[in-house]
Image: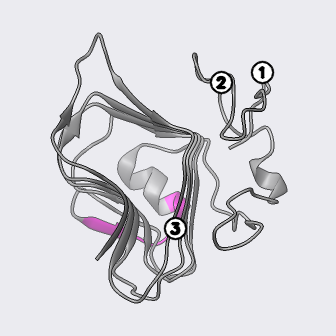
Amino acid sequence: YGYGLHLNRCDANLSERALIANNFIQVGGTSVAYGIYIFSGQFLNFYHHSVHLTNSDPNSRVFYNSSGANKNVLNNVFANSGGGLAYYAATSLASSNFNDLYTTGPNLGYWLGTTVGDLSGWRALSGRDFNSVSANPLFYSDSDLHALQVALDSAATAVSGLALDIDGAARDASFPDI
């Protein structure tokens, strides 16, 4: 197994939510891989990640939420170029929106026991991601996760306290990019 970011027992609280933000994560290989793997945790905010799985195992998941509650997932690129799922949610999320959910495989995600083929099915089942897109992010390379996809330009929502991107450049305060 390969893990880009593995979280276990990461519990914050309602008044002091944990912030996980501004990461480039890439996992390759031939075994099952996870970009962001949450075994347990609650009151977590996941903002502005570019996660790319390039491994060849179709059982891989870009964002894997096993347990815990009250997670917000905004402004992320979850791209699976190896045919696995972009999103796996075994438990509900407080919010998920303004993301790019992309896979080269036949199924986009898994929501509370049901596999979903595309973004419209994901929206209907989960009630989430109504402002999200499903487009190949066109990364510079497998590991340089700067995106060239114009559909991601000005497609995010502003998040308080995250004025700078991963490169230290200022985000557009009104129309940030995914």
Q: Mark 1 — residue?
A: 174
Residue 79: image location, x then y, percent: 56, 66
Q: Mark 3 — residue?
A: 118
On screen, residue 177 versus residue 61, left or right, reads right
Q: Is residue 4 above or below residue 99?
A: below
**Mark 3 against mark 1, which lies toward the viewer?**
1
> What whole-number distance in Å separates the C-alpha atoms at marks 2 and 1?
6 Å
Question: In this picture, which residue range is highlighted in magenta?
Answer: 114-120
> What whole-number distance in Å separates the C-alpha atoms at marks 3 and 1?
29 Å
On screen, residue 3 versus residue 102, left or right, reads left
- Residue at (43% x, 78% y) in the render: 84
**Disc number at residue 64?**
none
Give the residue type that dot 2 points to. Answer: Ala
- Residue at (73% x, 66% y) in the render: 139
Q: Nearer the viewer, residue 52 or 128?
A: 52
Q: Secondary structure at mark 3?
A: loop
> What whole-number distance in Å separates the C-alpha atoms at marks 2 and 3?
26 Å
**Which circle's residue, 3 or 1, is located before the other in the chain?**
3
Q: Is residue 126 above or below residue 28?
A: above
**Which circle's residue, 2 or 1, is located before the other in the chain?**
2
Q: Residues within 10 Å of mark 2 (few under 14, many from 20)?
A: some
**Disc number at residue 158?**
2
Q: Secondary structure at mark 2?
A: loop
Residue 75: image location, x then y, percent: 59, 40
Q: Secondary structure at mark 1?
A: loop
Q: Residue furthest front?
A: 168
